């Protein structure tokens, strides 16, 4: 009887998820590499020159350029204007070639630049608190190399939330790190 009871208890604990805890997906706010920065605002605010935080335009441009380069071009013709193509095509020549199989050992395609960002202006309006997200930590090289004393850079996961909160509240009194999130798709 004790053996049967032991098996029943183990089965019940496993089925209820207590024995072998089931982990869910990672919290989206903990994915990717993230920085909280205090940087200068740039731009005049006139048409064609919006007011944006430093580094954001360059980082976003890198990401957009990589998306454009990775996207296949639609409607491009392979024949040149001076080429002589046959009037009819056979089914075998009309079928596009199959892509090479993807190796499971192939490294994932990198996503350079910034994936997303959000900002809050400082109380004096000359600086911005920016939350920047990137898939590759190399996207932050320029920001991390900035040695100007007024620029503050914190890495989520390396710097404590209390340190980030207290530092940023010196520049924006009602700053709340818990509500300063950036969703990434």
Image (tube, rainbow, N blue to C red):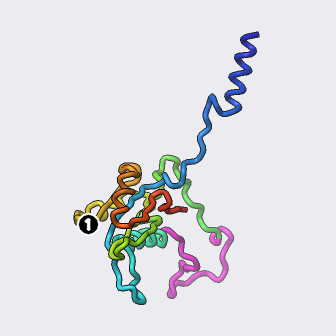
Q: Residue furthest front?
A: 173
Which residue occupies the foreground of this view, 61 or 149? 149
Q: Residue furthest top?
A: 1
* Residue 22, placed above or below residue 143: above
Which residue occupies the foreground of this view, 54 or 73? 54
- Residue at x-position 54% and y-position 51%: 27
Which residue occupies the foreground of this view, 31 or 69? 31
Q: Provide the secondary structure element on which disc 1 rests.
A: loop
- Quadrant position of residue 145: bottom left
- Residue at x-position 64% and y-position 31%: 18
| Residue 93 colored in magenta in the image | yes
Taking the image as shown, residue 121 lies to the left or right of residue 144, namely: right
**Residue 125 % position (x, y):** 36, 76
| Residue 158 colored in magenta in the image | no
- Residue at x-position 63% and y-position 70%: 93
- Residue at x-position 39% and y-position 76%: 52
Which residue is disc 1 drawn over? 150
- The N terminus is located in which quarter? top right
* Circle 1 crowding by C-alpha within 10 Å: few under 14, some 14–19, many from 20: few
- The C terminus is located in which quarter? bottom right
Specify the principal SS of the magenta part: loop
**Residue 136 % position (x, y):** 40, 57
**Residue 40 % position (x, y):** 32, 73
**Residue 6 % position (x, y):** 70, 16
Numbered range of the magenta stretch = 70-94
Taking the image as shown, residue 86 lies to the left or right of residue 9, namely: left
Tag count: 1
Which residue occupies the foreground of this view, 128 or 80? 128
């Amino acid at each position: 009887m004790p053996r049967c009871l032991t098996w029943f208890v183990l089965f019940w604990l496993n089925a209820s998820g207590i024995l072998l805890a089931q982990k869910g997906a990672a919290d989206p706010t903990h994915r990717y590499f993230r920085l909280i920065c205090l940087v200068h605002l740039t731009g005049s605010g006139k048409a064609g020159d919006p007011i944006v935080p430093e580094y954001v335009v360059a980082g976003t441009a890198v990401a957009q350029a990589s998306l454009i380069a990775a996207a296949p071009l639609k409607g491009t013709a392979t024949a040149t204007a001076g080429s002589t193509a046959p009037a009819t095509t056979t089914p075998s020549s009309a079928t596009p070639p199959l892509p090479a199989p993807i190796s499971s050992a192939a490294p994932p395609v990198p996503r350079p630049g910034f994936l997303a960002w959000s900002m809050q202006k400082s109380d004096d309006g000359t600086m911005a608190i920016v939350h920047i997200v990137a898939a590759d930590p190399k996207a932050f090289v320029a920001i991390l190399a900035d040695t100007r004393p007024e620029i503050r850079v914190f890495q989520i996961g390396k710097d404590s939330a209390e340190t980030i909160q207290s530092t940023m509240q010196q520049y924006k009194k009602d700053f709340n790190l818990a509500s300063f999130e950036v969703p990434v798709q």
